[in-house]
Amino acid sequence: METIIRTKVKDLLKSQPGNDVLAKGWVRTKRGNKEVAFIALNDGSTINNIQIVVDKTKVDADTLAKITTGACIGVTGTLVESLGGGQAVEIQAKEIEIYGVCDPMRYPLQKKDTSFEYLRTVAHMRMRTNTFGAVLRIRNHMANAIHQYFYNKGFVYLNTPLITASDCEGAGQMFQVTTMDLNNIPKNKKGQVDFTQDFFGKQTSLTVSGQLEGELGATALGEIYTFGPTFRAENSNTPRHLAEFWMIEPEMAFYDIKDNMDLAEDFIKYLVKYALDNCYDDVKFLNDKYDDTLLERLQGVSGTEFVRLPYTQGIEILEEAVRNGVQFEYPVSWGVDLQSEHERYLVEKHFGRPVILTDYPKDIKAFYMKQNEDGKTVRAMDVLFPKIGEIIGGSERESSLEKLETRIDELQMSRKNLEWYIDTRRFGSCPHSGFGLGFERLLLFVTGMTNIRDVIPFPRTPKNAEY
Ligand code: 4AD
Ligand code: MG
């Protein structure tokens, strides 16, 4: 007998009936009667299962008994037109090989409890569920779309370091990196930790952003983007924060704040449209199962113009809302950092579409942002999305050497540590801009999932670093 090459389920479901095929995958369900058994088989290539029809006189009872939910099998048989509803083709089994049995009493996904909370406790297995399969396939498509978008625009993909000695956002949320023996830390004469004895000879951490190095790239190559993991030791146990998340950071020479906003809006619309065009089955599954306004929201965003509004006007709208009886948990007045409840009010209640808020008070933004003439605000831009709040943060960068140095001093940051960065303003400084898109925040939007722990395979949050 000629050997048959395995075909993925995704391709089988699109194939014409008639040929003998080989499918491999994990059993989702098995049901049937005295004469036949029906097995739903999934191999992760699609949300859809292929149905295997087993004539019980042709496959021995022992083998059939071992085929339980979660078991891994290979099925050889004829692809035939399906008489039952729901699928065009199915496999009439001739031979079934069991690769791995799966004890129904111990299989974590056999339980009735399929809540997201429970699944997080078995995150090593949850990728086998329909929901996480869908989310992770969408995640894969989005990563691909991001590279495609920038590649087509001529941006250079720049790999910035994960271990760094500088705190880009200046928020002091860095995880330290050291090889020192924590039980025996070397001290200098002043009694302080002697980092010269550490691996890198200085104090280092995991990066909170690749932006500063990204600016070095943009002021040499023109337009770059980074796409990598980012680490923040912020102790915020919210459905929108991770201690390890992925960020996409484009940085462009000769872009002002308007060019920056145009790019951000075009980029995110491209990604949402890409999801609709390339992940329709998975998005539709999530829409139908959890949130039947998801598709509508995605279509809405890809076809609507974002509102562009200065922070000061945003605050006025929020203050007006409070006067009219809207209650927020956190107070709002000029100068405060907006909470996600405020951002969502603007987006969901007031405007009914995404909002780009600009010109924030300089005191709540990072040192590198371009200062406005008013002396109070900086040329920042945050893109705010329904259900999420902030999805993108960015700005035009301060290109004046003098203003940048003054701001670094004002904030009592170490200029010495930043000399390499300041050099971009010393030697051929240019107007430039950039932003950071939180990859998991994007995925929250595109999948409609409500907790950021459920759009990354292995979430890292305070007190949780399993696997
Ligand atoms: O607003 P952020 O802190 O901006 C920066 O890091 C800039 N250096 C970006 C730039 O201009 N190149 O972070 C950017 C985005 C946020 O808008 C949010 O989507 C996401 O990163 N983000 C997080 N996502 C998950 N968990 C966290 N703890 C996050 N913190 C920020
Ligand atoms: Mg931000």
Image (cartoon, rainbow, N blue to C red):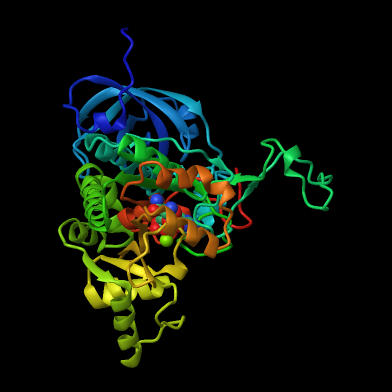
Residue appearing at x 23%, y 26% in the figure: 79
Quadrant containing the C terminus is: top right
Q: On screen, 86 above or below 24?
A: below
Q: Residue furthest top?
A: 1
Q: On screen, 94 above or below 257?
A: above
Q: Position of residue 397 (x, y in %)?
A: 36, 54
Q: On screen, 425 above or below 292?
A: above
Residue appearing at x 27%, y 33% in the figure: 10
The picture quadrant for ligand 2 comes to bottom left
Relative to 324, 368 lies left or right:
right
Q: Nearer the viewer, residue 253 or 209?
A: 253
Q: Nearer the viewer, residue 433 or 337?
A: 433
Quadrant containing the N terminus is: top left
Query: Can you see residue 46?
Result: no
Q: Position of residue 255 (x, y in %)?
A: 26, 50
Q: How many marks?
A: 0
Q: Position of residue 70 (x, y in %)?
A: 47, 39
Query: For residue 413, what is the image quadrant?
Result: bottom right
Q: Nearer the viewer, residue 83 or 402?
A: 402
Residue appearing at x 46%, y 41% in the figure: 69
Query: For residue 240, what is the image quadrant?
Result: bottom left
Query: Can you see residue 146?
Result: yes
Residue appearing at x 84%, y 44% in the figure: 184
